[in-house]
Image (cartoon, rainbow, N blue to C red):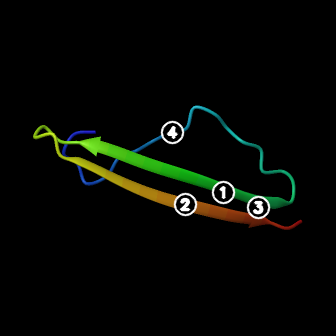
């Protein structure tokens, strides 16, 4: 990732959201700096589709 304050990410799969329901995506980021310090972040995104 480098030292930038943000990253870009593209999933390796696509999902069809063509039906009603609740969709939850969890993204976890684990990083280790050159000094061996470890950090973790997590975001959970939820969508509800009603047609």
Q: Position of residue 29 (x, y in %)?
A: 39, 47
Give the side of residue 9 with respect to residue 18, left or right: left
How far apart are labels 1 and 4 at the CA level? 17 Å
Residue that carries the numbered disc 3 in the rendered image? 22
Q: Residue at x 17, y 42 (%)?
A: 33
Q: Is disc 4 placed on a helix, strand or loop?
A: loop
- The tag earlier along the polypeptide, 1 or 2, is 1
Q: In this view, does 35 lie above or below 20?
A: above
Q: Is disc 2 placed on a helix, strand or loop?
A: strand
Q: Is disc 1 placed on a helix, strand or loop?
A: strand
How far apart are labels 1 and 3 at the CA level? 7 Å
Q: Which residue lies furthest to the top in this view?
A: 12
Q: Which of 10 and 22 is in front in this view?
A: 22
How far apart are labels 3 and 4 at the CA level? 21 Å
- For the residues labelled 1 and 3, say whether their Cβ atoms are less than 8 Å apart: yes
Q: Quadrant of the C terminus?
A: bottom right
Residue that carries the numbered disc 4 in the rendered image? 10
- For the residues labelled 1 and 2, say whether their Cβ atoms are less than 8 Å apart: yes
- The tag earlier along the polypeptide, 3 or 4, is 4
Q: Where is residue 49 in the image (x, y as percent from the top left)?
A: 79, 64
Residue that carries the numbered disc 1 in the rendered image? 24
Residue that carries the numbered disc 2 in the rendered image? 44
């Amino acid at each position: 990732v480098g030292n930038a304050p943000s990253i870009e990410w593209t999933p390796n799969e696509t999902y069809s959201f063509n039906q009603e329901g609740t969709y939850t995506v969890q993204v976890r980021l684990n990083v280790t700096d050159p000094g061996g310090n470890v950090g973790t972040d997590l975001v959970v995104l939820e969508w509800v589709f009603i047609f």
